[in-house]
Structures are given as C-alpha cells and as structure tokens.
Image (cartoon, rainbow, N blue to C red):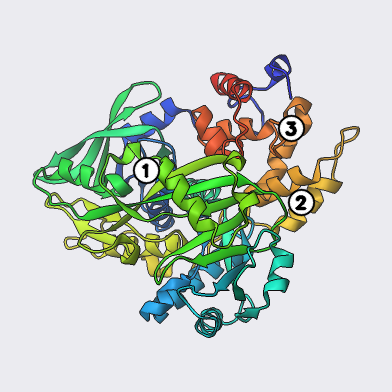
Amino acid sequence: MTSQSTLQSVPALGTHPASGSNPSRAETREQLSKATYDLLVIGGGILGISTAWHAAQSGLRVALVDAGDFAGATSSASSKLLHGGLRYLQTGAVKLVAENHFERRAVSRQVAPHLANPLTFYLPVYKGGPHGAAKLGAGVFAYSALSAFGDGVGHLLSPARAQRDVPELRTENLKAVAVYGDDQMNDARMALMTVRAAVEAGAVVLNHAEVTGLRFTRGRVTGAEVRDRIGGEEFGVNARLVLNATGPWVDHLRKMEDPDAAPSIRLSKGAHLVLKRTSPWKAALATPIDKYRITFALPWEDMLLLGTTDEEYEGDPAEVAVTDKDIAQILDEASLSVRDQQLRRELITYSFAGLRVLPGGPGDTAKAKRETVVTEGKGGMLSVAGGKWTTFRHIGRTVMKKLQSLPGRPLGEDFEPVSTLPKKLPLPGIANPRAVAHRLLVDRPAPGPRMAADTARHLATHYGSLAFDIVRLANEHPELGERIHPEAPEIWAQVVWARDHEWAESVDDVLRRRTTLTIRGLDTDEVRGKVQDLLDRK
C-alpha cells in the first residue's frame, strides 16, 4: 500500500487549479445563515435529497441539512435493490407493481444507468415450500408482463441449469426455479449523486449539521437552529417552509414543533450480512420464507449480501445494530437455498441494520405497506416519511406537488410546477459504464502503468463519466493511482475526490459510503489512519 510519506504531496482542498471543489463548511454556514430560503429540508436521506433536487429544479431557493452524513442511516442500509416488488402481486397491488417497474426502469435506463445494473433473480421452489411451481411460474410471468417484458419473460428453469449460474444453490428437494429480472445499485453512491444533482440545480447542502430547535414566526415554523457537529459552530437558517424528512427521527422533530404531537409512524428493523463469496454468482436468489417474506442472497460489490429481517423496533434509532440473533436468523433463512460452505461465519466481512419507516398502526410489520406518509403540523411544518428506494424520484415529485398546493401558497407562485419538470432528468456522470471502463483501460498516461481492470470497472459503475476527473487526479499525482488496499479496487484519488467534491468529513464517510472498503472488511487501522491524514489536510 501507499506509504504515509508519499501522500504528503497531495494537494489540499481547492489548491488544484481545475478542481471546482465544493465550498468550505464555513462558506456554506455563512450562505445558510444569511439568506431566507423558500424551502429548508431537514434530513439528508434519499427522501429529503430527492425533494431538494426537485425543488431546486423548480427554481426554489433550497437548503438541506442533516445531523449525520448524507444517506448515513436508513438510506445506505437497504437491500440495494431497484425492484417492482414481486410480493405485492399476491395482495393484488397490480397498479403499484407497474408503477414501481416504471420508476425502476427509468432510473436504471435513463436516469442513472452508470449506477444501476440489471440482475437476474432465481426463485427456488422446494418440496413443502410456501408456494408451488405453477403459482410462482405464473407470478413471475405476470411480473415481467407488468414491466412490458423489458427484462425478458418470467419463466421456470430446471434446477441443474440454475446451479450452473449459482454453484452454491442447494438442490436437495428443489423442484423448479422461477426466473425474473430487477435491478441493483450501491444505495450510498446513488444518494450522493442525487445530492450532487440537487447542488448543481442550486440547492445549498450541509451534512453533520444538527437541528437543535425550530424557529417560529407568529406560531408558524420559519426555520431552524443548527449546530455544526464538525466544528461546533451554531447558526440559524430562515425559510418560508420547512420539510421534516428525518426518517426514523420524524416524530422527534414533530415534537419540536408541537410537544403534544401524537406518533405518526412505527419502525421496522432490517438487518443484512455481507460475506466473501466462495464461487462466482451469475444470478441472485430470492427464497420464500413464508407467504409474505422473502430472503435474498445477492451478488453485490464482488461480495454476497444476505437478508433481510423484518421486526418491530422501539429503541433509539441511533442505536440500531445487528445482534447475534439477527445473524443467526439471516444465516438460518439463507440456508434454505444456499449451501453451508457459503454461510460460514468466518466469511462475514460486515453487517448493517436500517429502520424502515412504516405508517403507524397495529399489525405485522412484514405485511405493512411501504407507503409514504405526509403530515402537516400545527406550525405548518410538513413531515414526510416512508416509501421505497425504487420510487425515490416519484416521492420527491409527490412531496413537491403537496408543497405547491398548500393553502395560502407559502412557497408563492414564482416557480415551475413539478409537472413541467423533465420526467427523466439524468444524474451527474451519466454514461454507459462499459464504455467508460473501456476508455479508462485504453487511455493510459505515458509512461504510466495500465489501470487494473477491476479498478476501471469500479470507477465506471460508481462515478460514470466523473471517473475521468478522478483518474486525472491520479495522473497528476501518481501516488493517488495506487490501491487503498491490495484486496479492493479503490484508489487513493477517490479519497481526495470524496473530500473535495462529495462532502466527506469523517473516515467512515469515506470508507463506508463513498467507497466499499468497510463492507469488504478492509478498513484496517493503517487505512483509516491514512484516510484521516488526507481529510486533515483539507
């Protein structure tokens, strides 16, 4: 790995002549405190980010703050899927599945083809399982029909054929395998690119900025008091309208507005495991556990992602964590369709848990609808929570329509209605990732070494055409072209890029959400120390 001394020549923030680096935190704080915004979004998960993006496109003056990192909680703890929702078919939600498919295909084909990739799913049918082959065969056919057969025709496959693509598939008592198509992503990277899109549209954003109180004018919420968690500075933000998009913390902020506010949501915990793979996987497994639940085994980031759990959670959202019970449950459920040699505990490199935000009310969380809840408080603050990653653009548009139709028109009239915005505006870096990877491999600097194929693929599928800017950094400072860890595709230029262009403030911001070092189990003390050194020279 690159030594500490060789990184000393790396430029600090803003010193690169063509850097176009983000403004400093001090500059952003000043910007936030001196203006009056049309909309202040509190919460930098994907719901808040998407709403800020659409609001800025509409011509509104938008600010967004988050107490942690962008996508630092639930939004980077998903199953990494863009999907229509196969299980919704059995409840008769045909229209919902069709709408989900439309959004999924829009994101993966037109909006962010550089950040999403198609994934084939095998749904194994075992003797004595909760569903029969005929039912699942008809189900995947209907599912593919609702996406206009854009991912092929859902069908049944023989166990022998399926095992060629998934060598670790358990074949004892396996009667058939149903096949369908969906898409996959790195959720943290998708969220960051959406933040970038919001900023390019004019939004002002600040992470690690905690709201400590709300501002009121004649009983209405007109801003927030904020504390910068990095430097400790305190400042205020004024806004004509405030949107509470704090996810699991939505009721906490509602109580700042009204101490008597009744709970509006309940939380469901979803845990996942990341394991090293013992063989190549050309498809994912979606295995029915019972009538309502499916467990996934997903090839993701050269690893295997297992999960998820679904159980009511009543603790502090900040303390949600994977327990030994969660690990045992996930491995036990995965063993229905995955061979034991792939499920050894020593293969686990990382585990994470997130909280689904569900509408308040009784009943099993596994059966609860994944719908978006929008409420208006007595002080005029709008709160939004819940929904699916797949429909993040749709949710952003829906919230904007609600904001634009509020009584008294608090946002005024001088902006573009959301209905007139481009329907499939692409995220930054849009490009064919295969073409980008090819360019990265053939356009090597003389006399520099050829880029490794896995690094080229990684840069292309996590940054799109922005990968060329990262490689330019590495060409100008060859030490930044070296791998961060020999077993991961990332290079040191990505750390500098994260620092200067992607709002990375902490080591975990870099290693957990801007890169994949943490999920691979490669965030060693040595790596963390070098990343911290680069961050300190901001």
**Cα distance between the residues tagged 3 and 1:** 37 Å
Of discs 1 and 2, which sits in the foreground?
2
Determine the secondary structure under disc 1: strand
* Residue at image coords 34%, 36%: 319
Q: Quadrant of the C terminus?
A: top right
Residue contact between numbered discs 2 and 3, judged by CB atoms under 8 Å: no
Count of number-bearing discs: 3
Above or below 229: residue 61: below
Q: Whole-Å distance between the Cαs marked 1 and 2? A: 33 Å
Location of residue 87 by image quarter? bottom left
Element assignment for label 3? loop
Going by the numbered disc 1, the residue's amino acid type is Leu
Q: Earlier in the sequence, mark 3 or mark 1?
A: 1
Q: Secondary structure at mark 2?
A: helix
Please tell me whether mark 3 or mark 1 is closer to you in this view.
Answer: 3
- Mark 2 surroundings: few (<14), some (14-19) or many (≥20) residues within 10 A: many
Q: Which residue is mark 1?
A: 64
Q: Does label 2 or label 3 sit earlier along the sequence?
A: 2
Viewer-side residue, 13 vs 385: 385
Label 2 – label 3 distance at C-alpha: 20 Å
Question: Which residue lies under the disc numbered 3?
Answer: 486
Residue type at tag 3? Pro
Is residue 76 among the parts visible in the rendering?
no
The answer to whether residue 426 is seen in the rendering is yes
The residue depicted at 12 percent of the width and 49 percent of the height is: 261
Residue 335's x, y, as percent?
55, 57
Q: Residue at x 61, y 26 (%)?
A: 524
Task: Note whether 114 is above or below 31 in the view shown.
Answer: below
Return the residue nearer the eye: 423 or 286. Answer: 286
| Residue 437 disc label | 2
